[in-house]
Image: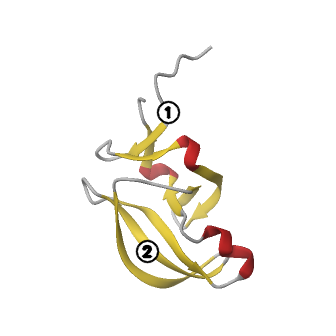
Amino acid sequence: MADFTGPRTYCCFKCQNLVAYHDDIVSKDFQASNGRAFLFSHVMNVKEGAKEDRQLTTGLHTVADVFCCDCGEDLGWKYIKAYEDTQKYKEGKFILVKYKITKGSG
């Protein structure tokens, strides 16, 4: 049996800054333009960029890119607004691109 000393974490792949907890993953079934992505209910230690409307696979959304607050790496985006009723569950949640994050040692 594994001996975990704390919650499983995800860090920025570039600088190892803590950006999310495994328990905050809503779904692993997302696709970004540059690879697989995870939907998180909450992330930390990121800065939000400017809001913009973006046409995504699932329709039009208002999003803001999110960047590591330590090294500035673009990690994904935050869903600000979904225009389709079936996509409203994404509002306020975050996409982190899988290859931009690494499992923490926690």
Q: Which residue is mark 2?
A: 64
Nearer to us of marks 1 and 2 is 1
Does 21 sit left or right of 68 as displayed?
A: right
For image coordinates 59% across by 49% down, the residue present is 25
Residue farthest along the left direction in this orientation: 70
Q: Residues within 10 Å of mark 1 (few under 14, many from 20)?
A: few
For image coordinates 34% across by 53% down, the residue present is 45
Of the pair 50 and 76, the residue shown nearer to us: 50
**Numbered disc total:** 2
Q: Position of residue 34 (x, y in %)?
A: 51, 63
Q: Distance of mark 1 from mark 2, alpha carbons?
A: 27 Å
Sequence-wise, the earlier of marks 1 and 2 is: 1
Q: Which residue is mark 1?
A: 7
Does 20 sit left or right of 69 as displayed?
A: right
Q: Position of residue 52 (x, y in %)?
A: 45, 84
Disc 1 element: loop
Residue farthest along the top direction in this orientation: 1
Image quarter (top left, top right, bottom left or bottom right) of the C terminus: top left
Disc 2 element: strand
Q: Which mark is residue 106?
A: none
Q: Amino acid at mark 2?
A: Ala
Q: In the rendered view, tell whether residue 77 sits above or below residue 42.
A: below
Image quarter (top left, top right, bottom left or bottom right) of the N terminus: top right
Q: Residues within 10 Å of mark 2 (few under 14, many from 20)?
A: many
Q: In the rendered view, tell whether residue 71 sits above or below residue 79.
A: above
For image coordinates 39% across by 44% down, the residue present is 11
Q: Residue 16: which quarter of the image?
A: top left
Q: Position of residue 75 (x, y in %)?
A: 41, 59
Q: Position of residue 68 (x, y in %)?
A: 32, 56
